[in-house]
Amino acid sequence: MFQFLTNTQAGCRRLFPRHLLYQMTTLAFCIAAAVIPRFVDVQVFAADPSRRPNVLLIMTDDQGYGDLHFHGNDKIDTPVLDNLAQTSTRFDRFMVSPLCTMTRASLMTGRYYLRTGVASVTRGLETVRGDETTIAEVLKKAGYATGCFGKWHIGEHYPSHPNGQGFDEFFGMATGHWDNYFNPRLEHNGERVATQGYITDVLTEAAMRFVQEHRHEPFFCYVPYNAPHTPMQVADHYFDKYKARGLENKPAAIYGMVQNIDENVGRLLQQLDDLKIAENTIVIFLSDNGAEGPQGSRFNAGMRGMKGSVHEGGVRVPMFVRWPGKTTPGRVVQQVAAHIDVLPTIASLCGVGALHAKPLDGISLAPLLLEENPPWPAGRMIFTRTPGWRTLVGYSAPMIKKLEPFPAAVRTQRWRMVNEGGAWQLYDMQADPGEKQDVAKSHADVVQRLSTAYQDWFAEITLTPLKRPLIPIGYAAAPVVALPAPEAYFGGSIRWYNQWGFAHDWLTDWSNPADAIAWEADVVAPGKFEVSLRYACTDAAIGVKLRVEAGRSAVEGVIDKSHEPRPVQRPSRIEKKRFTQTFGSLRLGNIALQPGPVRITLKALEAPAGEICDIHSLILKRVD
């Protein structure tokens, strides 16, 4: 409690830094407003523990606010989601982060993403620290069955992996990007499995199996679909339908993917009805950021900004909450709210107390959902910042020594203040929802107050240094660990094949034995590990001797057969050159690892023909 009150006091000081009397009265109000949702409402709103409500949390990827017919887009058909909006209590000013990883970190933890260790979307900096507490851990402790079906994107290595963050079952992709949406090979609790069908259909079927299996006990089913994120892959009948409406290829593909999502949400909701558990299931639907693409590329409800922007269009998303008999169908909540509020809200509605060892940034929205005109802090601020990941994910330095100025914003009930790398801009969102008139000069006092609050907030949430995390090796729950190319350190002529080093990219142009590839790891338990390499090469590389070093231990092996590199362009409805590759496997031998931090280095001792190989990952499998 003391830690929570201290955090609350700091927040109020940021809001009202000048006048002591005003600060003290505001502090009392803020404590009451924050403590009531976080603690008292567990008793006021909680269901009978023997009948705790189920939770179905659905989140789509890159589906903007305007990608719904209900929000005024007459080019798209979303009948299920339109009906869900009408039968739910919906938040009309619900904010997330400008990019996917940041939203997922805040959604799962109830904390701003920079607190959790997240600073990027790739190369390890998308990883939530393993000591953070997720919604799944909170509910699992209260007796819930927990399952995640879809895109995780906040840590592929245990314990940041879903199975290490409270989920009994995980089916989907722990990383952030997937190349093939038809018959994809997905992960099921650490094992790769083949599937048949379109990825959104496959994920839905897995979620439905989970609900079926756990229908007689409280469950938390998290369905973070990876559509309509790129690549633009969708069945012909969806694509052709929207092309026939005169749309360009990209929006036609996206709208087709959204319609497929709509149908799958319908399947999930129908199952709740068929199992007669809809009345006791809280359904939450939202998206992770604004629509991907340049401004004006598709309908965005008149908002300024798209994905990646700190303007309203980059962060305002649909947010529907349905709990039959508890929430009011058609009610529209006008108060600003955010992704950080989801964890405390779910905990409150489910009657789960003692949330967290770490202070939350979010507050429970339960009063807004279940009460008429509840008291609410009028001066609440929602902070936003883009990560600037291209600067943060340098190849060599493991520590992020400084976060350079990047686009940032502060949102209150009335104002949106934005900084895109220069001066602060200010927009009156009640009078000017399209952010067309910058009123910073005429409201200098507001700019001063909000910018001071932002600076104090940013200084506080970055007190713990951000760094590229070490890859954990040795957990009993994760006997096989992949050291992926996107998390490698390298130099010389070595480069990413697809330029940015997103998930499933690989390293190419390795020809000089003077160059090496390395990973920073942390051995949590000592042991012997089998080392193998996923690689591609031509016949010219046969005979190349490779060496893997880890501290005082090393293992060597020779490339004895080629695996011809034949990158193919990833299927897409739009012209965007991204390539995929298949890789062979080469067992190098066993290596002994001692506990503690270690740099694992892959070297080529010789390359007679001037060619080594392309690298996908180094695999360590515990054998003792």
Image: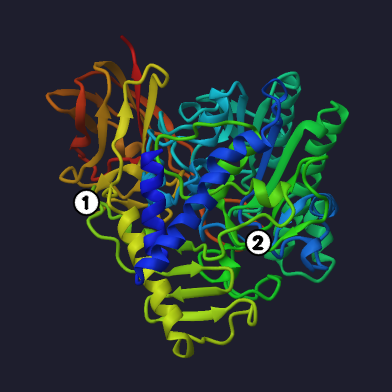
Up-down: is 256 above or below 448? above
Q: Residue furthest left?
A: 552
Q: Which residue is mark 1?
A: 397
Nearest the viewer among 300 and 347 is 347
Nearest the viewer among 535 and 423 is 423
Q: Secondary structure at mark 2?
A: loop
Residue 618 in sight in this render: yes
Mark 1 vs 2: CB contact within 8 A: no
The quarter of the picture where the C terminus appears is: top left
Q: Amino acid at mark 1?
A: Ala
Whether residue 622 sits left or right of residue 596 in the image: it is right
Query: Residue at (83%, 51%) from the top-left corner?
Result: 329
Q: Amino acid at mark 2?
A: Gly
Whole-percent x, y for residue 622 in the image: 34, 16
Whether residue 342 sits left or right of residue 597 in the image: it is right
Up-down: is 306 above or below 317? below
Which callout, 1 or 2, points at the residue further toward the start of the chain?
A: 2
Query: Residue at (15%, 45%) from the top-left corner?
Result: 514
Q: Residue 516 sits in which quadrant? A: top left
The quarter of the picture where the N terminus appears is: top left
Q: Residue 298 sits in which quadrant? A: bottom right
Q: Secondary structure at mark 1?
A: loop
Query: Residue at (69%, 62%) from the top-left corner?
Result: 92
Badge 2 crowding class, 10 Å Cα cut-off, few under 14, some 14 to 19, many 20 or more, is many
Q: Residue 70 sits in which quadrant? A: bottom right
Query: Residue at (85%, 52%) from the top-left corner?
Result: 83
Q: CA distance from mark 1 to mark 2?
A: 35 Å
Whole-percent x, y for residue 614 in the image: 35, 42
Q: Which residue is mark 2?
A: 64
Whether residue 336 sits left or right of residue 501 in the image: it is right
